[in-house]
Image: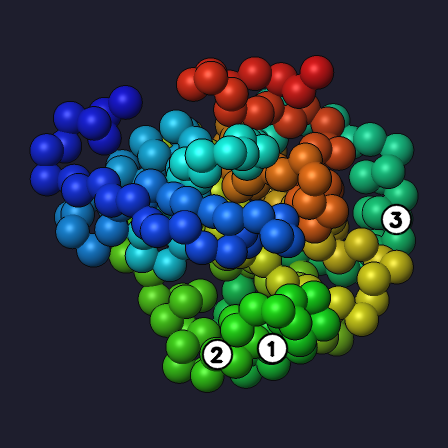
Amino acid sequence: MDFLKNKKLIFRRTLEFDCSYLYGRKEKRLYVNLLNSNKNNSLISDLTENGFRRSFDHMYVPICESCNLCISSRININKFTLSKSNKRNLKLNQDLRLIKASNSMKDKRYKLFTEYCIKRHKESKMGEMTSEEFSSFFYNQRNKTEILDLIDKSNNLFGSILLDILDNGYSAVYSFFDAKLSERGLGKNLIIQTVLKLKKKNVPYLYLGYWVKDCNKMKYKILFNNVELFTHGVWTEKS
């Protein structure tokens, strides 16, 4: 854990607040502000590998007193194989391809993001972001990132994913998609196509963030083949 040797890092605890994943629960986090570090790429890599998650300009890990359901997850890309469900999803969305994001899609991206938040996260204030706030959240990073867009042959935007580039893989920081097309499984398709793209680049892992057993929105993470979970300080294959 190289990050523990960095004496300039200051870890803080939040007060309890409403849980981001489970209704009626309280959440508490241990976090570190990335603005105080000039080695963000290595720091984010070390922290992600040890169960932390990046949000905006800080890294955090839940330290809830009465709950331990948040478990970091990642896909072992070297071992990854497509399931029957994955293949059906790819066939259903065979008209879509995942490409490196271009500046020309910024307006479309912001519009799709706000529509996604209204449809999928009515309780969140993220959908109230201005265009400038969204740019700060999605584009203006202090570390190495990559954005990929899911488009059809007419350049219509169906989804986007923001990835942190780590020392031992990539981390899916945030993704959004056309939530009106629920039957197409676009969120799942974003992950599948990202994994296949990274597999060609010999990237070992794609970190998916926290899997929460009792949260339906997080259920998809455990359904991929070759998922590993971070428990008791060790990455192990899901049983």
Do labels 2 and 3 touch, CB within 8 Å? Answer: no
Residue at position x 53%, y 51% in the image: 19
Is 186 in front, or is 100? 186
Spot occupied by residue 22 in the image (x, y as percentages of width and height) = 62, 49
**Sequence order check, earlier mark of 1 and 2:** 1
Residue 230 in view: yes
Q: How is the image coloured?
A: rainbow
Q: CA distance from mark 3 to mark 1?
A: 28 Å
* Image quarter in which the N terminus is found: top left
- Above or below for 204 versus 164: above
**Quarter of the figure with residue 141:** bottom left
Residue underneath mark 2: 129
Residue at position x 54%, y 34% in the image: 67
Residue underneath mark 3: 91
Do labels 1 and 2 touch, CB within 8 Å? Answer: yes
Can you tell which mark lies on residue 167? none
The three-letter amino acid code for the residue at tag 2 is Met
SS of the residue under disc 3:
helix
**Sequence order check, earlier mark of 3 and 1:** 3
Mark 1: few/some/many CA within 10 Å (<14, 14-19, 20+): many
Q: CA distance from mark 2 to mark 3?
A: 34 Å
**Sequence order check, earlier mark of 2 and 3:** 3
SS of the residue under disc 2:
loop
Q: CA distance from mark 1 to mark 2?
A: 8 Å
Spot occupied by residue 159 in the image (x, y as percentages of width and height) = 66, 64
* Image quarter in which the C terminus is found: top right
Q: Which label lies toward us, 2 or 3?
A: 2
Residue underneath mark 1: 114
**Quarter of the figure with residue 47:** top left
Asked whether, in this view, residue 46 is left or right of residue 183, the answer is left
Asked whether, in this view, residue 33 is left or right of residue 220, the answer is left
